[in-house]
Image (spheres, rainbow, N blue to C red):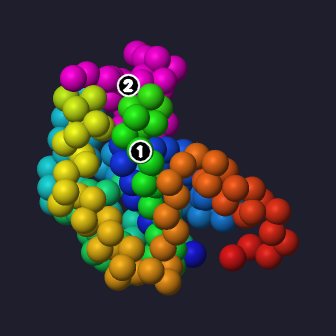
């Protein structure tokens, strides 16, 4: 099983990816851990690409994150399932702010070591506006159109929770 988890910042991609990895007992790669070095430094492009390419050689995987330059096309092609978290900006903002207060001064397990949780003006603007440009929204729609048969789109946390519950209640692991 190969699963790509995409969506807006603050929607819960990493949490869902962890849950799916545990459910299917497969490795999980959070692309934020590839993108960043300690203190929010950006990792070298060649090194990032090698890390993702090497991980994608696994027989099964869950990869969460958007990062087009990190084999997005190949991830989507290889994925048996694509999950898109298309939550509204205000939910994502509230969720990211809550996450900040819960993790302030520490690095989350789905973030690179030494990248302490932060919530600044740029990140707030990314969640509310810059990460939701027409081009980005169209990109998500294009992914859905191209991979409709293997794509699930969730618009709120209740839909995600129902999906997770359905996985946990199924007798047969997909």
Q: Quadrant of the N terminus?
A: bottom right
Residue at position x 28%, y 36% from top? 128
Q: Which mark is residue 117?
A: 2
Mark yes or no: residue 116 visible.
Answer: yes
Q: Nearer the viewer, mark 2 or mark 1?
A: 1
Q: Residues within 10 Å of mark 2 (few under 14, many from 20)?
A: some
Q: Is residue 73 above or below residue 33?
A: below
Q: Nearer the viewer, residue 41 or 96?
A: 96
User: Where is residue 18 drawn, in percent x and y?
Assistant: 57, 50
Q: Residues within 10 Å of mark 1 (few under 14, many from 20)?
A: some
Mark yes or no: residue 33 visible.
Answer: no
The quarter of the displayed image where residue 146 is located: bottom left
User: Where is residue 118 drawn, in percent x and y?
Assistant: 33, 23
Q: CA distance from mark 2 to mark 1?
A: 22 Å
Residue at position x 15%, y 50% from top? 44
Q: Which mark is residue 88?
A: 1
The answer to if 99 sits in the magenta stretch is: yes
Residue at position x 40%, y 81% from top? 147
Q: Is residue 126 above or below residue 62?
A: above
The segment highlighted magenta reads 96-121
User: Where is residue 80 drawn, in percent x and y?
Assistant: 51, 79
The answer to if 83 sits in the magenta stretch is: no
């Amino acid at each position: 099983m190969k699963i790509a988890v995409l969506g807006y910042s603050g929607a819960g991609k990493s949490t869902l990816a962890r849950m799916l990895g545990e459910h299917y007992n497969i490795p999980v790669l959070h692309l934020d851990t590839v993108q960043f070095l300690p203190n929010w430094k950006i990792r070298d492009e060649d090194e990032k690409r090698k890390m993702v390419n090497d991980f994608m050689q696994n027989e099964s995987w869950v990869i969460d994150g958007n990062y087009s330059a990190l084999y997005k096309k190949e991830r989507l092609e290889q994925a048996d399932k694509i999950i898109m978290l298309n939550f509204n900006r205000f939910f994502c903002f509230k969720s990211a702010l809550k996450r900040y207060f819960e993790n302030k001064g520490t690095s989350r397990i789905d973030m690179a070591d030494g990248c302490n949780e932060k919530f600044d003006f740029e990140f707030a603007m990314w969640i509310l506006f810059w990460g939701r440009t027409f081009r980005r929204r169209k990109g998500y729609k294009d992914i859905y159109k191209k991979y409709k048969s293997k794509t699930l789109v969730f618009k709120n946390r209740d839909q995600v929770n129902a999906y997770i519950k359905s996985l946990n209640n199924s007798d047969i692991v997909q």
